[in-house]
Amino acid sequence: MIMKQCLTIARFNTGTILALVLITAAGCTSPNTHTHDNAFAYANRGAAKGAKGDLDGAIVDLTKAIELRPDYADAYICRGVYKGIKGDNDGGIADLTKALQLRPNNPLAYYDRGVAKKAKGDLDGANADFTKATQLKPGSSR
C-alpha cells in the first residue's frame, strides 16, 4: 500500500517523461524547464527510486521537488512515507502533517501519518488518524 501510494504521484505526460529522462541521464540538478514541471519530474523520479529501494535517493529528489514547489502536498506525503520506512517517524510525521496543512482532506496522508504514529508508539494518535482517514474515504484504513 505504501509504495503504491507514492507511485500515485507518477502521473506522467510526454513532457514529464522527457524531463525525467533528461534529469536522470544528465544528472542535472537544475533542468531547463518550468519550475512546476521540474518539481513534478523530481517527485516522480523520487517515487521511482523509492520503489526500487533507494530510499535515500528518493528523499533527496522529493526534497528537491519540495524546494521547487513548496505547496506540493503529494511530494510531502511520499517523502514522509519514505522517511517512515527508514525509521525516521518524527520526520515522516512532520512531512505528513505539512501535507495535511496543504490538503486537509487527504485520507492517504492521514492513513500514512497514522502508520508513522503507530510505529512510534502513539497509538491514540494513530487511531485518531486512521479514524479520520476512514471518515474521509470509507475503507481507506485497514
Image (spheres, grey):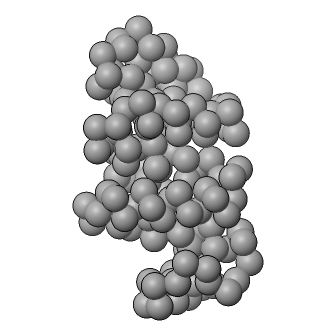
Query: Hey, which residue is sitting farthest right in the picture?
Result: 34
Q: Where's residue 23, x and y in %?
A: 51, 83
Q: Residue at x 41, y 8 (%)?
A: 124
Quarter-of-image position of residue 83: top left
Residue 9 point in image, percent of width and height: 53, 59
Residue at the (34%, 59%) spot, across then down? 56
Q: Is residue 80 left or right of residue 132?
A: left
Q: Residue furthest top?
A: 124
Residue 8 in sight in this render: yes
Up-down: is 23 above or below 108? below
Q: Nearer the viewer, residue 27 or 12?
A: 27
- Please name the residue shown 52% across and 33% down the image: 94
Could you say where residue 88 lies in the image, as x and y percent from the top left? 35, 37
Residue 18 sits in quarter: bottom right
Q: Which residue is pictured at 48% across the width and 65% down the height?
A: 61
Relative placement, left or right, of 67 versus 90 is right
* 9 on left or right of 53: right
Residue lying at the far front in this picture: please name it: 29
Quadrant containing the C terminus in the rendered view: top left
Q: Nearer the viewer, residue 125 or 108?
A: 125
Report the label total: 0
Whether 30 is drawn above or below 47: the answer is below
Q: Quadrant of the N terminus?
A: top left
- Residue 13 in sight from this viewpoint: no
Tell me residue 76's x, y (percent).
Answer: 55, 47
User: Nearest the camera: 12 or 74?
Assistant: 74
Q: Is residue 48 left or right of residue 137?
A: left
